[in-house]
Image (tube, grey):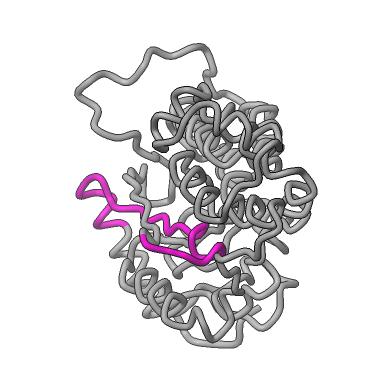
Amino acid sequence: MRPDPPGGCRRSSSRKGPLSITSEVIAEDSRGDGDTAMTRARQSAGDLLRQWRQQRRFSQLALALDAGISQRHLSFLESGRSAPSRAMLLRLADHLDMPLEARNALLLAAGFAPIFPQHDLADAELTAAREIIDRILAGHAPHPALAVDRHWTLLSANAAIEVLTAGVAEHLLVGEVNVLRLGLHPEGLAPRIVNFAEWRRHLLRRLARDVALSADPALAALLKELDSYPAPIAVDMSPNPEPPETVVAVPLIITSPHGPLTFLSTTTVFGTATDVTLAGIAIESFFPANGQTADAMATLAGSVEDAPSGPRE
C-alpha cells in the first residue's frame, strides 16, 4: 500500500481496498443505523420518554422539575393518557440530552415529522462540513489525524495515519474500517502499543460512555466485542493502579522503526450540528508528546516527499 502525498487525505473511488473510505465516498457509510430509528419509532412516545428518562437516571419528579412541568403531567405523557405537543417533546428531549436521531424517533412516535435532517456527507448540503474535515486532516500533517462516524467507522484520514496502520492485518483495513477494532484487535495495532493495558482501559471506558449517552445497540455490541479480545502475547494485563494525578492525559505509545512514538490525542466535533450525520462525526488528532516523536514524524514525512510518485496499489 503506497503512502499518500504528504498532508493529503486518502481518496478513492472504490471501497474494495484498504483504507478506501474518504470524504468522496462516504455516501454508503454516513446514513446511520436506520433500523434502530425505525424500531424506536414503532414504540409510543410515552415509552420512549420513559426509556430515556431511565437511561439518564432521572426520576419522574426530577425530570418534571428540570423541564418546568408537573410530575402528574409527565406521568400522563409517559402513560399515554395525555398527547404531547411537539414543543413539549423537544423540551423534554433537550433536558434528557437525547441524540438528534433519537429526537426524530420521538417525534415520529408521536405522529410529528422529524425536524433534524440526516444528509449523506457526500451531499451538497454538507459540502462546507466536508471541506472543513479535509482541511483539518491535511493541516494536521505530518501527524496522524482521522475522521470517524458515531460508530467509530473510519471516514477519512491523512497520509500520516500510516504510522498507526503499519503491520496491521489486511482484513482489518478492508471495507468498513472500525478504528477501535483496528486499535485493540490482536492482529491490529495492539501488539505495537507499549502501554496496551492503559490504552485499552481508556478506549473501553470512552466507548462505555458513548453507549450510556446514546443507548445505541450497535455501540453496545462493539463494546462487548472489544472487551472480549485477548491481549497480545507478552502484554501484562494484571490490574494496574489508576494513573497518578501528575498524568494529565493518557498517551498512546507505540513501537516503530524510529523508536517508541508517544502521542496525545484530541477530539474535534461540530458543536452546533443540527444534522444527524454531522452530529455523529468526530476528528481524532494525534500530537507528538515529546521531541523524539516530533522528529520521527518529520523524518517520515520527508521520506514520503522524497519517494517517487506512482499509481496507488
Q: In percent of the image, x 33 and y 43: which residue is there? A: 262
x%, y% of residue 214? 57, 42
Query: Relative to 209, does residue 278 appear above or below in the rendering?
Result: below
Taking depth in this image into account, of 146 and 80 the one nearest to the observer is: 80
Taking depth in this image into account, of 23 and 254 the one nearest to the observer is: 23
Asked whether residue 1 appears in the rendered view, the answer is no
x%, y% of residue 23? 54, 76
Location of the N terminus by quadrant is: bottom right
Residue 101 is covered by the magenta coloring: no
Residue 143 image-quadrant placement: bottom left
Taking depth in this image into account, of 259 and 85 the one nearest to the observer is: 85
x%, y% of residue 76? 63, 32
Asked whether residue 140 appears in the rendered view, the answer is yes
Q: In percent of the image, x 50 and y 54: which residue is there? A: 87
Taking depth in this image into account, of 113 and 182 the one nearest to the observer is: 113
Query: Relative to 147, does residue 94 appear above or below in the rendering?
Result: above
Report the span colored magenta.
272-296
x%, y% of residue 141? 33, 68
Q: In percent of the image, x 60 and y 68: which residue is there? A: 118
Q: In percent of the image, x 19 and y 24: which residue is there? A: 246
Describe residue 205's horizontal placement relative to residue 297 as left or right. right
> Across the whole image, how many numbered discs are drawn on residues?
0
Location of the C terminus by quadrant is: bottom right
Residue 282 is covered by the magenta coloring: yes
Query: Relative to 89, does residue 242 appear above or below in the rendering?
Result: above
